[in-house]
Image: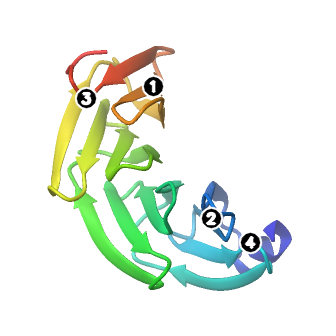
């Protein structure tokens, strides 16, 4: 799959990859600003979604679904339905590039950005919680439980967060 994507994608670098929890879909993204979808079982290319306006930096599937979330330097998070093969929504809020993303089983997405914030996006409520604690950009995030996550920053720090507290 990687060789086929590299040939078809030109000189653009791949910066993000995710596989659905059932192993059906592979999503990749990068410098060409598209989210590319592959059938991981047959290794066939399905389609590319061109909606991002800048580099795609992160991809995450919601556990147990074919809902895909993408993060980008365009300061947005986008939601895709692979069952419908369609764009669903755009989440706005970061003041700078979004570089990290994770999502679990619940409809909560956590992102980290160059604006020094972690954001928890409550999808059904169409709202977000903003968390500040790192002195520099937040480069990676990963859920530990449904309400707790860890982040790593350009400042070398690691923080454990909870949706119940604004500081790590």
Q: How far apart in space, not on screen, are marks 1 and 2 (Cα)? A: 23 Å
CA gap between label 4 and label 2 equals: 11 Å
Task: Determine which residue is flagged by label 4.
Answer: 40
Q: Residue at x 49, y 81 (%)?
A: 83
Residue found at the far right of this picture? 3
Q: Position of residue 113 (x, y in %)?
A: 37, 39
Residue 125 image point, x, y percent:
14, 55
Taking the spot 32% from the left edge, 58% from the top edge, the residue there is 76
Quadrant location of residue 131?
top left
Task: First in sequence, mark 4 or 2: give its number.
Answer: 2
| Residue matched to label 1 | 150
Q: Residue at horizontal 42%, vertical 17%?
A: 159
> Which of pointers 4 and 1 lies earlier in the amino acid sequence?
4
Looking at the rendered image, the quarter that the N terminus falls into is bottom right
Circle nearer the N terminus (3, 4): 4
Disc number lying in front (2 or 3) = 3
Residue under the point 37% across and 23% down:
136
Label 3: few (<14), some (14–19) or many (≥20) C-alpha neighbours in 10 Å: some
Residue at the disc numbered 3: 163
Disc on res. 28: 2
Q: Are marks 4 and 2 in contact (CB under 8 Å)?
A: no
Horizontally, residue 139 falls left or right of residue 38, namely left
SS category of the residue bearing label 2 = strand
């Amino acid at each position: 799959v990687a060789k086929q994507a590299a040939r078809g994608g030109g000189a653009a670098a791949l910066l993000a990859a995710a596989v659905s929890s059932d192993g059906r879909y592979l999503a990749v993204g990068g410098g060409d600003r598209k989210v590319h979808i592959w059938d991981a079982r047959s290794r066939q290319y399905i389609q590319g979604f061109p909606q991002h306006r800048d580099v795609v930096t992160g991809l995450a599937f919601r556990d147990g679904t074919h809902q895909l979330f993408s993060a980008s330097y365009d300061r947005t998070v986008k939601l895709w339905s692979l069952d419908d093969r369609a764009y669903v929504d755009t989440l706005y809020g970061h003041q700078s590039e979004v570089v990290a993303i994770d999502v679990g089983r619940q409809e909560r997405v956590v992102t980290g950005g160059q604006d020094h914030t972690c954001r928890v996006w409550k999808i059904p409520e169409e709202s977000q919680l903003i968390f500040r604690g790192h002195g520099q950009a937040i480069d990676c995030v990963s859920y530990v439980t449904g309400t707790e996550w860890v982040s790593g920053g350009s400042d070398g720090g690691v923080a454990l967060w909870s949706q119940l507290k604004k500081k790590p």
